[in-house]
Amino acid sequence: MQGHQRITADVLQKLRDAEAFAPLHDPVAVEIIEEMMKRLPDVPHFACFDTVFHETMPEEATTYAIPEEYRKRGVKRYGFHGLSCESIVMQLREAKIAVPKRMAIAHLGSGCSVTALVDGKSVDTTMGLTPTGGVVMGTRPGDLDPGLLIYLLRQMNGDQSKELEAMVNHKAGMVALSGMANDMKAVRTAAADGDPRAKLAVDVFVRSVRKAIGGFAFLMGGLDAIVFTGGIGEHDSATRKETLDGLQGVGIALDAGLNAAKADGVRAVSAEDSKTAVYVVPAAEDRMISWHVGQMM
């Protein structure tokens, strides 16, 4: 199933079949869809997918090095946060900012990903088959050694797959490292007060995002722009600063005053001499959903 869809019985069944890929999001979404279709049976219903924006990724970016029998079943890197990324491109155009040729979008919230774009189209992203992989997140670990998952399965008792699924979706990431709730502001406060677990959580998180941005910078031969979005990306100036520290070698420099300033909407926070523009742009998935639904009506 490709593209955004008007919901039919067939589409709804495919959504149910795909619940295992996104257990944090899909089951609840399907329940809401089913309930709304019962309440409003004469109203058309639509599904917009985060994965659609990433359908432009080349095959070498989507293919896992696993046996072909599994790849034929649809196991590949799909990517997520696509509606957010698409909304960034839209908002840059609305702000009369030419869409940069080579751009990285860091969507940092409870879920986090970094996407590489060329001419406004996705060419690679950190999330894969599910929203669990990539950079470190609030309750998800990001990329793990496959051997680690095998090791964890051997250590667990009872229904091992369900226990492991619950761990990697709800009990890993920042909450596992910090021992605190999924709240970056609280974790940063604890780190500033000398809590070593909170400091480690922040350091691991920031390092993972920096590695992703740096990797895409070298993959594309440089970056013309970096965009921070999502709850953390938009509102945590310290995360933006710490993420870009160490990337000065590829021409990235922040303006400390602009970065620390409180403002809404699309705004630049890069220094005048930065070879790479740095923007803060609010995620606007709701606008993109509305636009796509309008196109399908």
Image (cartoon, rainbow, N blue to C red):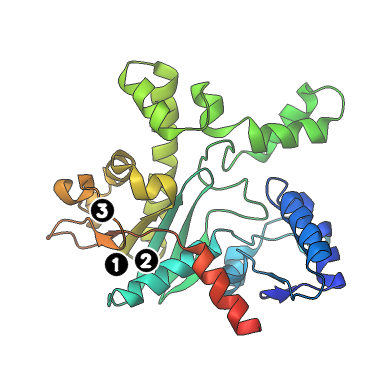
Percent across and percent down for residue 258 are 18, 51
- Are circles 2 and 1 on residues that touch, CB within 8 Å? yes
Residue at image coords 76%, 50%: 27
Q: Which residue is mark 3?
A: 263
Percent across and percent down for residue 32 are 74, 55
The type of residue carrying mark 3 is Ala
The type of residue carrying mark 1 is Asp
Horizontal side of 119 relative to 60 (left or right) equals left
Image quarter hosting the C terminus: bottom right
Tell me how far mark 3 sits from mark 2, CA to CA: 22 Å
For residue 96, what is the image quadrant?
Answer: bottom left
Relative depth, front residue between 135 and 5: 5
Relative depth, front residue between 241 and 215: 241
For residue 219, what is the image quadrant?
Answer: bottom left
Q: Which residue is mark 1?
A: 224
Q: Secondary structure at mark 2?
A: strand
Q: Is residue 91 above or below residue 297?
A: above
